[in-house]
Image (cartoon, grey):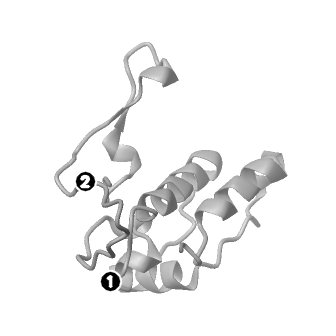
Amino acid sequence: MHRDLKPENILLEPDLDYEKMKIIDFGTAIPFDRKGKKLNEMLGTPYYIAPEVLDGRYNEKCDLWSIGVITYMLLSGKAPFYGETDEKIYKMVKAGDVKFAHSSWSTVSKEAQGFIMSLLNLDYH
């Protein structure tokens, strides 16, 4: 489990071959626990942190939430959850209210939006 996935931790080779992407910064990573043990250490970057991490009871699926946020940002150029302070961002994350109202979403397929919604799911169990 990486526990701090964000665009800054994803590198591309100079030839932009997407099959050669690299994930970096494993400082917060831990081995996957097949027994399903819940973790409680709150860490991560506010825009990308999963609500279950904020609640102090999470598992490997916290990384899926981060992938959903990254995908949202790649397709729209905007963060799905934002605020002037970390606390405001956390409040939006916990609410999980994802909107596709900005004009940038008019050219994004419903399938892509559905993919994002499947990742930004408050019911992570």
Name the residue nearer the viewer: 74 or 50.
50
Residue at which label 2 appears: 31
Dot 2 amino acid type: Pro
Mark 2 residue element: loop
Q: Residue at x 75, y 57 (%)?
A: 114
Dot 1 amino acid type: Gly
* First-in-chain label (2 vs 1): 2
Q: Residues within 10 Å of mark 1 (few under 14, many from 20)?
A: some
Residue at which label 1 appears: 56
Q: Residue at x 31, y 55 (%)?
A: 32
118 with respect to 34 (left or right): right
Q: CA distance from mark 2 to mark 1?
A: 18 Å
The quarter in which the N terminus is drawn is bottom left
Q: Position of residue 20 (x, y in %)?
A: 42, 21
Q: How many marks?
A: 2
State the image quarter where residue 54 is shown: bottom left
Q: Position of residue 97 (x, y in %)?
A: 64, 79
Q: Can the viewer see residue 85?
A: no
